[in-house]
Amino acid sequence: MARGAKNPWILVILLIIGGLFGTLLGQAFGDFLPILKTSFPPIGFEPTTINLAVINVTIGILIKVNLASIIGFLLALFIYFRL
């Protein structure tokens, strides 16, 4: 890898951890700071099943975000660019 190049998988992992961490903090401190529980409409698509007679395939992704998880995502981006 060239000097200064960053692995995109590290970014994906950090974003997942940041989102989970932010959501946990939002749930824990949401009673004290209700703004942390402010949620937004889900992003993605509902699970869809395709029946191909031999195999059933179910695909879908739905991301539910709140203000605390967005803060976690931003913190993960900050950490990624500081590495």
Image (spheres, helix red, strand yellow):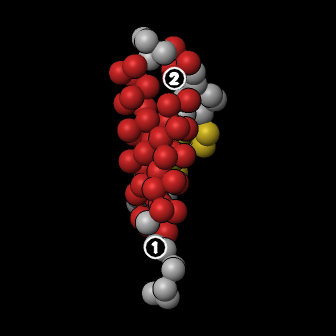
Whether residues under marks 1 and 2 lie with C-beta atoms below 8 angstroms apart, the answer is no
Q: Amino acid under label 1?
A: Asn
Instruction: Kindly identify the residue that appears in the image at 43 percent across and 25 percent down.
Output: 26
| Front-most of residues 27 and 55 | 27
Query: Whole-Å distance between the Cαs marked 1 and 2?
Result: 31 Å
Quadrant in the picture for the C terminus: bottom left
Q: Amino acid under label 2?
A: Leu
Name above or below for residue 40 compared with residue 46.
Answer: above
Instruction: Kindly identify the residue that appears in the image at 43 percent across and 49 percent down.
Output: 16
Residue at the extreme bottom: 2
Q: Position of residue 61 (x, y in %)?
A: 52, 45
Mark 2 lies on a secondary structure that is: helix
Name above or below for residue 11 compared with residue 62.
Answer: below
The mark nearer the N terminus, 1 or 2, is 1
- Does the image show residue 33? yes
Provide the residue designation for mark 1. Answer: 7
| Front-most of residues 10 and 59 | 10
Quadrant of res 24: top left
| Tag shown at residue 36 | 2
Instruction: Kindly identify the residue that appears in the image at 61 percent across and 39 percent down.
Output: 43
Name above or below for residue 19 compared with residue 67.
Answer: below
Residue at the extreme top: 31
